[in-house]
Amino acid sequence: MQRADLRFDQQRRRFAFVANRFAWDALPEKQRRRAGIHFDDVEAVQVAGLQRLPADAVLSLLAITHEGTETLAGTITLSFSAGISIRLKVACINVTLADLGGAWEAALAPSHEP
C-alpha cells in the first residue's frame, strides 16, 4: 500500500486503507488479493514516521496490536516496515476486512505462520 491508500474520516470516526494481502486461505496456491480494511469507532489517529517517506513509497503492514481495557477501548497500533506506525485511539474494537476483486499469482509466500 502507499500513503494515498490510507484515510481517516473524522466525521464518520473511520480509519480505512486498501492493501494487498497474501491469501492464506488459497494454499497450496500462492495468491494475493486486494482488500479493503476499515476500523470504526476511531476517536483519534497518531502517525509516526510516515512523513519522511516519499508519497509513492510502498508500505508493508507487519502487525496489528491492541492495548486496552476490559471494555475493548484503547489503542490499536498498525506497525509497518521502516519503523512507521499508526496508532488508532478507539472506543471499541470494530474492524472489517473485505476482498476487492479477484486474486493473482504470487511469486513468494510469507515465511511466517498466519
Image (spheres, helix red, strand yellow):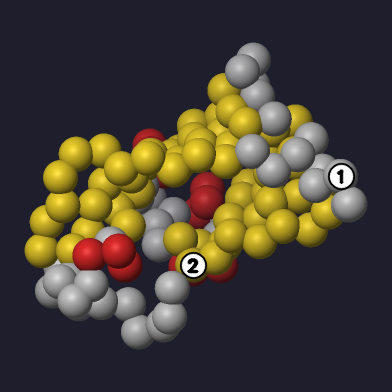
Vertical placement of residue 107 versus 70, above or below = below
* Dot 2: element: strand
User: Which quarter shows the C terminus?
Assistant: bottom left
Give the residue at the far right of this rendering.
70
Vertical placement of residue 29 versus 65, above or below = below
Q: What residue do we see at 69% from left, 30% from top?
A: 41
Residue 76, percent from left and from top: 69, 51
Residue that badge 1 annotates = 71
Tell whether 87 sits left or right of 84: right
How crowded pointer 1 is (Cα within 10 Å; few <14, some 14-19, many 20+) is rated as few
Residue that badge 2 annotates = 62
Res. 45 image quadrant: top right
Total number of numbered discs in the rendering: 2
Closer to us: mark 2 or mark 1? Answer: 1
Q: Is residue 15 visible?
A: yes
Q: Amino acid at mark 2?
A: Leu
How crowded pointer 2 is (Cα within 10 Å; few <14, some 14-19, many 20+) is rated as few
Q: Earlier in the sequence, mark 2 or mark 1?
A: 2
